[in-house]
Image (cartoon, grey):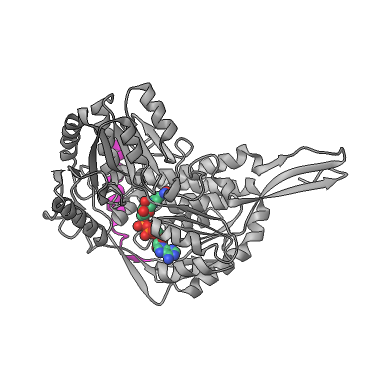
Amino acid sequence: MATATPRMKITYATLSADNEELQTAFDEAVGAVRGELGRSYPMIIGDEERTGRQTFEDRSPIDTRIVVSRFPIGTRQDVRDAVAAARRAFPAWRALGWQARLALLRRAADLISERQFRYAALMSFEVGKNRLEALGDVEETADLIRYYGSEMERNDGFVRPMGSLSPDEHTRSVLKPHGVWAVISPFNFPMALSGGPAAGALIAGNTVIMKPSSDAPLLAYEFVRVLREVGVPAGVVNLVTGPGESVGAELEENPDIDGMVFTGSYEVGMRLQRSFTRDYPRPIITEMGGKNPAIVTAKADLDEAAEGVMRAAFGYDGQKCSANSRVYVERAVADAFVDKLVERTRAIRVGDPTQRESWMGPVINERAINTFRAAVDEARRDGAEIRAGGAVLTDAGLERGYFPTPTIITGLPTDHRLFRDELFVPLLVIGEVGSVDEALRLANETPYGLTAGIYSHDRGEIRQFLDTIEAGVVYVNRRAGATTGAWPGIQSFGGWKGSGSSGKNGLGPYYVQQFLREQSQTVVGEEPPA
Ligand code: NAD
């Protein structure tokens, strides 16, 4: 396979893919990985590749006849064995020192970048991402490793000299790893949200047990393979697969796990938040859902707003945690804004995401398509106007996948359920407001607080938005995405309120510290050893 990697860096904000070299490399990768689909993969527990007695099929949402991979249905015993392997590997991994750990992980990051096209092609089949989104996810994984590594370095391994109250006392603050961390990941960023949090934990010196979504285990598996390939020792990174009820439940209850990082829905995250700390305090980072608002004021550039909202509402079918799912627009510009948005939305090409012309692909599974259908029916029943979309495509070639059309809904009261619940499908509700104050109040009136955006060229309105919006990631006048498109080391990413527990975002400068605990060391008489 020709892997002439184009020089251009592909991020979620990459606006167009009119780079022929990139397109060809992706097409070739799709052809190459097609022959690999349907294989059986093991769990990775210590140095063992463990196959289970029973397996589950990871089928493509593009065409459910395509089995992308088969993985074992793990048991509680498999998880216990993975915990034991991670526990055994911890002392040596910690003792290796952060510089040596970083050297290994940086090699892994480079390999991931080198294989960007192969992994992205697999991801397109696995979760239905279009090529730019899939390429972005892979490169984000590599950049997460690089960024977290650079933070470890910038902070000199988090050893900091402190003051002294007496001349013969030497005191320092040292951040140390906890031990064994569980990393539970969602389907929608199969590599970045399994590899990224795992990298944070590993760079800090912990060992990990990864549990990916059953809709997307393959890219987490590939991530673990890369780490093993560059020489990360057995047991430092383990992979268990299977349902939340057995594998997830054991991770939740096993007392030998020191910390947990979860990314996924509010319902599962809150359950883990409560149960993981039931008997004693253990760190748990939960990154959860969003109902992310965009505000369009009368002072907005409406072309900018329509473009940014379209990209954020319908990029990856509204299945990003940062997806824009509600808009509050000032009445004076509402018609003009909606017309522009509808025009752009109707131009979206929905189809097989491995094809270059498709901008939107399928949603992840039948449950998602049912959620979409039910929401459209509910909107119709409640008197809404469906301004675009509202249908599920069953054209030839798409009839065995899950292909909703990008949907814009107006005319619902702003206290309607569709303004409140995260649906995770390409469905946007638009409400008219009388003022920016009202828009901000409605934007904040939600248990969630992940991302938010505003379109306005009035400095006072922008300041008011930045001062009062309750969200962990906010954007102003962003054409590349009203609420989406964060990148490591640039936009840190995390939620407030019901969207996240830590108040310290992933992709940012305070992330790695969360996998560490502080020890104050005072040594009398001589400098403490390095
Ligand atoms: P999900 O909550 O259904 O699943 C997430 C993970 O939790 C999966 O691996 C699943 O198998 C596991 N799980 C389920 N039940 C469990 C249990 N009882 N114990 C332990 N683990 C269990 O989420 P999903 O559908 O895969 O992903 C979509 C959701 O994730 C959306 O709500 C989205 O907003 C959110 N998300 C948030 C962020 C963020 O950074 N805040 C990022 C991506 C996705």
In the displayed structure, would residue 291 be above or below residue 17? below
Q: What residue is at 65 percent from the left and 40 percent from the top?
A: 156
Q: Main secondary structure of the magenta part?
A: helix
What is the quadrant of residue 278 in the picture?
Answer: bottom right
What's the residue at 38%, 75% (across, down)?
54
The magenta-colored residue range is 21-40
Q: Is residue 17 visible?
A: no
Spot occupied by residue 1 in the image (x, y as percentages of width and height): 33, 48
Residue toward you, 376 or 89: 376
Q: Quadrant of residue 470?
A: top left
Q: Report the front residue among 204 and 354.
A: 204
Count of numbered marks: 0
Apparent side of residue 173 relative to residue 48 in the rendered image (left or right): right
> How far from the left and from the top, in percent, is residue 417?
26, 51
357 with respect to 445 (left or right): left
Residue 455: x and y, percent? 31, 29
Q: Residue at x 87, y 37 (%)?
A: 167
Q: Is residue 218 above or below residue 158?
A: below
Residue 40 drawn at (x, y percent): 36, 67
Q: Quadrant of the C terminus?
A: top right
Left or right, 111 with respect to 322, comes to right
Q: Nearer the viewer, residue 377 or 404?
A: 377
Q: Is residue 179 magenta?
A: no
